[in-house]
Amino acid sequence: MNGNPIRKKMGRPQIEKPKAKFLRTRVTDEEYENVMTYADEHSMSQSELVLGAIKKCYPECFK
């Protein structure tokens, strides 16, 4: 190995369950504003808001 120690890979650490899939939906201007306002007022991202709503409505899917 030419005397060089093996270095660990640099960058972000691997996560256990990576989120690589995307969901898209079409909404009206009013629905969009409602979502953005709620998320902003509660310091949430759009993803956190949508996933939280899904988990609340369908808890059996997230056991």
Image: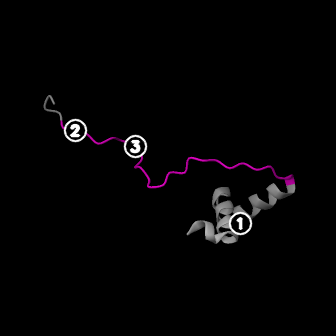
Q: Give whichever of 45, 16 is nearer the camera.
A: 16
Q: Magenta span covers which residues? A: 5-29
Task: Tell whether label 1 touches label 2 (CB within 8 Å).
Answer: no
In the picture, the disc for residue 41 is 1
Query: Mark 1 belongs to which amino acid?
Result: Glu
**What residue would you read off at disc 2?**
6
Query: Mark 3 belongs to which amino acid?
Result: Gly
Disc 1 and disc 3: Cα gap in Å? 33 Å
Mark positioned earlier in the residue sequence (2 or 3) = 2
Identify the secondary structure beneath mark 2. Answer: loop
Numbered disc in front, either 2 or 1: 2
At a point 13% along the width and 32% down the height, the residue shown is 3
By secondary structure, the bulk of the magenta-drawn segment is best described as loop
Mark positioned earlier in the residue sequence (2 or 1) = 2
Q: Is residue 57 left or right of residue 28?
A: left
**What residue would you read off at disc 3?**
11
Answer few, some or many: residues within 10 Å of disc 1's Cα (few below 14, many 20 plus, some between 14 and 19): few
Residue 60 place in picture, x, y as percent: 62, 70
